[in-house]
Amino acid sequence: MNPKVSFGHDFLYVMRSLQLSASPKSIDPIADAATRLFLVMWGLTAEEADEANNLFFQHVDQDRSGDFRACFERLAGHVRKDRVASERLVIQAAAIASIDLKVTSEETMFIRALEGYLDLKPSEFDALLKQGANWAVGLHFFGNTYRVSKKD
């Protein structure tokens, strides 16, 4: 399998699990669109992002989505030795967690689990969480503005 598609699958699985940890019945469409946008920021083409998304849903439909911990560890392992990639993952996870402008204790626990896998100081990690929260505000505004403009 294409390694970028495999990474994309794990990224989608982890980010969607993050969303479902706060609201087990639904995935926020703005957060999911941001997650797909983040795949492109990781270097996936639109086609590879679509392939990763299709693979994710194939696995869900076949009840083969895999072990969350394995996906989480693969994702964290992929970025662990790359400081810039580690920072990007924390910022993006924090953005997805707070895109609805509130963060649950489940989401906080989920994000804090990353801290143990990545080689970042607590103060650096906290600064990245703030950047992610700022991204969330922008993405929330963008998504809502787009949604409202399309209702007309």
Image: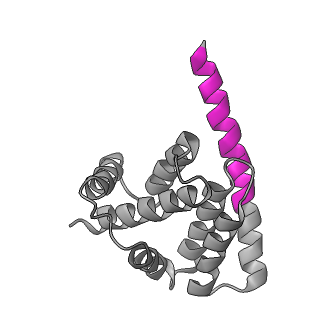
As displayed, is residue 41 above or below residue 47?
A: below
Horizontal side of 12 relative to 91 (left or right) equals left
Q: Residue 66 at what x, y percent from top left?
A: 33, 70
Identify which residue, 152 or 43, lies in the foreground. 152
What secondary structure prevails in the magenta region? helix
Residue extending farthest top: 152
Tell me if residue 7 is in the magenta stretch: no
The residues colored magenta run 132-151
Q: Residue 91 at what x, y percent from top left?
A: 64, 64
Tell me if residue 140 is in the magenta stretch: yes
Identify which residue, 103 or 119, lies in the foreground. 103
Horizontal side of 77 relative to 85 (left or right) equals left
How many marks overall?
0
The image quadrant of residue 13 is bottom left
Q: Residue at x 54, y 56 (%)?
A: 20
Q: Residue 9 at what x, y percent from top left?
A: 36, 62
Q: Residue 127 at what x, y percent from top left?
A: 77, 71
Identify which residue, 19 or 5, lies in the foreground. 19
Horizontal side of 60 relative to 115 (left or right) equals left
As displayed, is residue 72 above or below residue 51?
A: below
Identify which residue, 59 or 151, lies in the foreground. 59
The image quadrant where one finds the C terminus is top right
